[in-house]
Every structure is written in C-alpha cells, then in structure tokens.
Amino acid sequence: MNTKPQIHVVWLKRDLRLYDNEAIFNALKTGKRVLILYSFEPFLLNDSHYSKRHWDFVKESLKDLNTALAPFNSKVLVVQSNIIAVFNQLLSNYKISDIYSHQETGILVTFERDTNFKRFCKNNLISWHENINNGVRRGLKDRKNWNTLCNAFYEIEPLLFNPEENQLLSISEIETLETYFKLPNLQTDNNSPFQKGGRSIGLKYLKSFFKDRYPNYMFNISKPELARSSCSRISPYIAWGNLSIREVYHEAYHLKTTSKHKKALEAFMSRLRWQAHFIQKFEMEHTMEEASINKGFHKLKKSISQAYQEAWKTGQTGYPLVDACMRCLNETGYLNFRMRALVVSFFTHNLWQPWQEATIHLSQMFLDFEPGIHFPQLQMQAGETGINMLRIYNPIKNSLEHDPEATFIKKWVPELDALDTPFAHQPFLMTEMEQQFYNFKLGIDYPYPIVDIDKSRKKAGDTLWGLRKNKKVIEESKRILKKHTLNHRSSSF
C-alpha cells in the first residue's frame, strides 16, 4: 500500500508570480495540497544566452515570492538540479499525480528539456498540465483564429491567488525537503545598476507609469534618454513573469475610461498585444533561433570580423550614438526599442555581420531577454524576413533627431563631454586645429569611425533589395505571410 502523502506540484519557469498565474490557480482549484517549485537547472545556468544579471533577477523574484507566501506559512522550494532529478527525489517523498506549469516558448534546449520531461511524466503516470501563457497558443498551423483566441484570453479577469487554509505545503515541510537537494545561494548585489526582480518592485514601476509617466509615452518613446522614464520599464517583469500581460492590459484598459491621454494608453496597449504576436511567431517557427525565417536568405554570406564585433560590443565604433547605446545596455540592461533597432541595424548592415553573431551578446545584456521577442526582432531589423520594410538606421541622423543636445551621448561616452554639441554628434568632423582647441585627439581619445556609413548602407541596401527579387525569397515571403498574417484584425489589436 502506498502511504505517501499526495500533493500536486506547480513548476515555475518564467512565471514568477502568484497573481494571475494559471498554473497555480488550476493546481489550487483541485483542493489538493500544493508544492510550488523552482529549479535552477545547470544546463540553463551554463547556457550562453543567459548571464548573471538574469539569474540575479530570478533570485530577487523568488525572494519576493517567499515574502508574499510567508502569511500562508509557505514558500517556494528552490533547488539547483536537473528537473527530472528533482521530481525523482520528490516522488520518493510524495505521491504526485499532477504537475502544473505554463507552456514555455523558450530556446531549443528548453524545448528538448520539456520533451524529455513529458516522457518522464508519461512513464510515471503523472498528468502534466501546461497552461497558456500570455495568449500564446501551441500547435497552430496559421493565424486564422489566433486573434479571436488571443482576445478571449485577454478578456478574462486576472486570476486570483486564494489558497485554502494549509493547502500549500508548510515552511517546515519544505525545509525538510530542502535537506535532499543542493540549494542555490539567493543573495544578490543590492548596489547593482540593474532593475531589481520581484513582483512588488514591478508593481511600483507599473503604478508610477500609470500615475505620472505615461502621458509622455508616445512623445519620448524613440528618445534614448527620455524613454528611460517615459516608457513603462516593466519589460523585465513581463519577461520573467513577475507581472502578466493580461493584468497590465486590464489596468491600462480601465485607466483609459477616465484618462485625458487615451492615445498614449492605446499605443501602450497595442505594444502589449504585439508582444504576444511576436512570441506566437517564434512558437510557430522555432528554427528562427538559428536561421532566418525566410529560407531564401540562407544563401546570404557575410564575412565575420571579430574586430568589428568587439568594437560594437564595447562601444568603440566611432559613432557616438551607437557607442552610447551599447555602453548603456552593457551597464544597465536596458535600451528603448528604437535604439535596440539601431544597434542591430548598425551591426548587420553597416558592419555587415550575420545577425546570429549578435544573438548571444544582446541576449546576455538585455535584462528583459525574451526568446520569442529576441529572435524575430533580430531578423526583422537585419532585413531577412522578406516581408518587413528594410530599415537601415543612420546613427548620425538618429542622434541629431532623438538626442539633439547630445545628453545621452555625453552621459555614456564621457570622453565627448567637453565637446560642443555638434562635435559630440560627429567628432570625426573636427579639424586638427579644432582638436587642439578642445585638447582632444581623434584615434586616441575616441576612435575614428570603423566604417563609412554611406558606403556600407548602399552595399547592404543593394544586396538585400537584390535578394528580395530572388525566387526562393519571394516564395518564402508568401509562405510567411500566409502563415502569420492576422485575419479579421479587431480594433482592440
């Protein structure tokens, strides 16, 4: 006779919240006792897409979760182990018939992990319930009904967290379980320049955005310095699941009924919905992690230059806005959308480097790294989808337009701080006499431009536009449009 106590387990991934968490909600709805689990899996800790800033954010999120669970005399079981090894150990202590988690649109290694875990569950007669995350649907062949399905998801009121008394495993029970596992150190650096993880901090960003900051959202969204306060800054909290897209959307929707700045809220809400659109595209085209979605561009060959790539990564290209953006990203983990597009455009078009070579550095630096956003956006900005407008950003034009006083440039490229504004935008225009006047030496204090943007822009444009006439590119473009076009798009989208 099996006398082990029975529990259900919620396996947290990128859904580090209690509120509006369908996996937790459904597990609690059964009335069974529930254990909430998170595992730092070695294969992910060592994966090149991630860096310390990500895992610190997760640790801070887990500590915040435990604070929220304390009134219920519970906490998350946080371990460091292969997930199958974790459940093998749990099965020696408990009878587990059901596991709950969200459907993860992750990278190839997490897909392979989940495939193996599904087999493990089947072999152990465990029902694994994978819940929809942020409106993204698995197994779709096209987008004919996706918009309707997504709208239905967003119309549902956010799910409450309301466990019955003693339904969650107690702190003492979890501390007993901890003795069987390797436990990670959850301490992080409080003085780091990155946004701190956790739902409570994510809610503070959201509250301040809807209270004071959103009216300037549309005006400053493209400006590298002003966007840092006028944009919501909640992207890491959505990427790691401290906040759900649905709850944020509902907050914005309700605010719009009384706001004088409805257009700003509509623009913000639109971008929330497009987030799901891009992740859905990645869910349906998983090969985008390594190759262009348009197979016609697979023939495009670019010579790899480690010198170019290193100059780009470290902000030493000789183009002040590009360098300021890369240095800012490296130090803070954040850039506004237009500047992200600009640095990718510069890398893929002006430096003529494969977008795949930018993947790892950017994913490690973006605190809000979300695979379903990352890879489609890289390919779109690189001009290798065949369906999107080819945009080759001019870094000088953008700096003059979006950072006219060179405030952002001088902040992140301090060697240009003493120069008058026109030279801060284009230091390479300085004559020898002007360099002497400013006690500034090009090539020593700041590098010469590593490429000619006009020549490199023409080469990239001619090559990519030429490829768009290729038969294979055209065929693939039609396939992509047929598969991913949103039919009967509603005004809410």
Image (tube, rainbow, N blue to C red):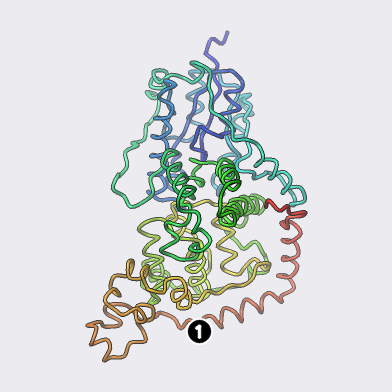
Residue 73, position as x, y percentages in the image: 42, 20
Image check: 490 left or right of 276?
right
Residue identifier under label 1: 454
Residue 309, position as x, y percentages in the image: 42, 69
Q: In the rendered structure, which amino acid carries the disc numbered 1?
A: Asp
Residue furthest to the top: 1
Front-lying residue, 70 or 288: 70
Residue at the (56%, 53%) spot, across then down: 260
Neighbours of disc 1 within 10 Å: few (<14), some (14-19), many (20+)? few
Check the image and report above or below for 412 versus 177: below
Residue 136, position as x, y percentages in the image: 64, 45
Residue at the (28%, 88%) spot, across then down: 434
Give the secondary structure at mark 1: helix
Image check: 96 left or right of 296?
left
Front-lying residue, 96 or 119: 96
Residue at the (54%, 56%) spot, across then down: 374
Check the image and report above or below for 126 versus 341: above
The quadrant of the rendering that contains the N terminus is: top right
Quadrant assignment, res 203: top left
